Image (tube, rainbow, N blue to C red):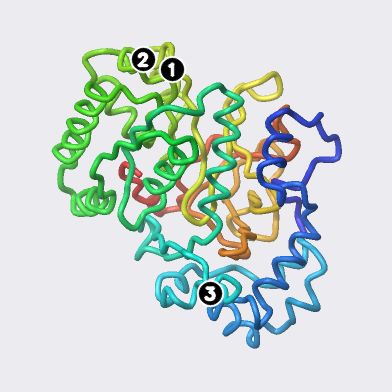
Amino acid sequence: MPAISGVPATATLAASPLLDRLRETVPALAVDADTWARRMMRWHFSEETGSPFWLRRRAALGFDPLRDVAGLADLDRFGLFDKQALRTAPAADLVPRGFAHRPRRIFETGGTTGRPCRVADVTTGEINVRIYRAMLELRGLAGGDALAMTPSGPHAYGAFVARLADSWAGNTLAVDFDPRWVKRLLRAGQPVEPYVEHLIEQTVELLELHRPRLLFTTSKLLLELAPALPRPLAAYGVRGVCTGGTSCTAEETRYLEENHLQGVQWIDTYGNTLMGHALQGDPWAGCARRAYYLPPPLGFIRLVDAADWRQPVAMGERGRVLLVTLLEDLFLPNLLERDSAVRTGPHPWFPWEGVRDVQPYAAAGEAAATEGVY
């Protein structure tokens, strides 16, 4: 199997305080990849604990995941995962039997590449909160109130912000935000400026009245919000801006940092509902750009040749994102994502490969996916 971003590099960098803290708060992050892969096969394909979604597919696989998956490399046997199955599966089929009596939430993707996909969140939301909070703590940003200029309703982002603030008894202020409406306007060739202005008006009012410590939004909305504010974000009491969702170019990043984010830490993550959070590794001597690192063994990113998903691209080359998600409430083997990125080496904080310069993927002669504001 080609090398996977997430498997520790041969020349492993020294463990960082952040990595130590992550493994302390989420013990599964200390489990080696092959052991975790076998554990997840037993969970998802045992009659006692597996979901109807995966148990129904077991007989048609052509191999036995319980017997034939000895480690991470054997997940190639599943072939490419068709996310269409998550668009049509009944919500009840997505919940593992081992979680039958546990509370859960059903979340949907933004619908960038078609009808939304659905997933069941039983434990993933709590894991994401613990990982993100550990990162904020080491940056001195955990605590206080949060403003979520993010999608809510069926989307995981807004719920994540509320859960995160709950973890330190903070208040969450929310902006009413439907990203699908923006994408519908874009695809119809209609102007989106009035809707974006509507989002900004709500946000400015909340900033002025409540002075939140943290602002959560997307890069695209931050590009619209920052220059529209009568004062810099720091003047509203904001100490950290946390973005995710849409991509941001190097020029856009420089523009925001130099003109609008003085006195504010900007933390970006790469991820989505099917992936979780690939954490930001700040620029360092080995990489002048911010890069993103998905914590193994819960998830792995491979950057592959667009024509052959089994063929990795070389270090420093651009490839299409291939995702493996290995969570107790979500198993996704070999999902070709909507993005491309550049393969990047380990970071002082993260002793495994990462990705940088993420952008929407477009095959030759085709248009890239419509990102909108999310």
Which residue is at 60% across, 55% downward?
322
Local packing at callout 2 (Cα closer than 10 Å; few below 14, some 14-19, many 20+) is some
Question: What is the distance, in whole Å, between disc 1 and disc 2 at their CAs?
Answer: 6 Å
Above or below, 65 against 198 in this view is below
Q: Secondary structure at mark 1?
A: loop
Q: Position of residue 339 (x, y in %)?
A: 50, 48
Q: Secondary structure at mark 3?
A: loop
Residue 236 figure quarter: top left
Q: Position of residue 297 (x, y in %)?
A: 71, 52
Residue 237 figure quarter: top left
Instruction: Tell me: 136 left or right of 1.
Output: left
Which residue is at 30% across, 55% downward?
153
Q: Nearer the viewer, residue 273 or 256?
A: 273
Of the residues under marks 3 and 2, which one precedes in the sequence? 3
**Residue annotated with mark 1:** 264
**Residue annotated with mark 2:** 234
What's under tag 1, amino acid-wise? Val
Which residue sits furthest bottom? 59
Q: Position of residue 92 (x, y in %)?
A: 44, 76
**Residue annotated with mark 3:** 100
What's under tag 3, amino acid-wise? Ala
Local packing at callout 3 (Cα closer than 10 Å; few below 14, some 14-19, many 20+) is few
User: Is there a contact, CB below 8 Å, between mark 1 and mark 2?
Assistant: yes
| Quarter occupied by the N terminus | bottom right
Of the residues under marks 1 and 2, which one precedes in the sequence? 2
What's under tag 2, amino acid-wise? Ala
Of the residues under marks 1 and 3, which one precedes in the sequence? 3
Instruction: Tell me: 48 left or right of 117.
Output: right
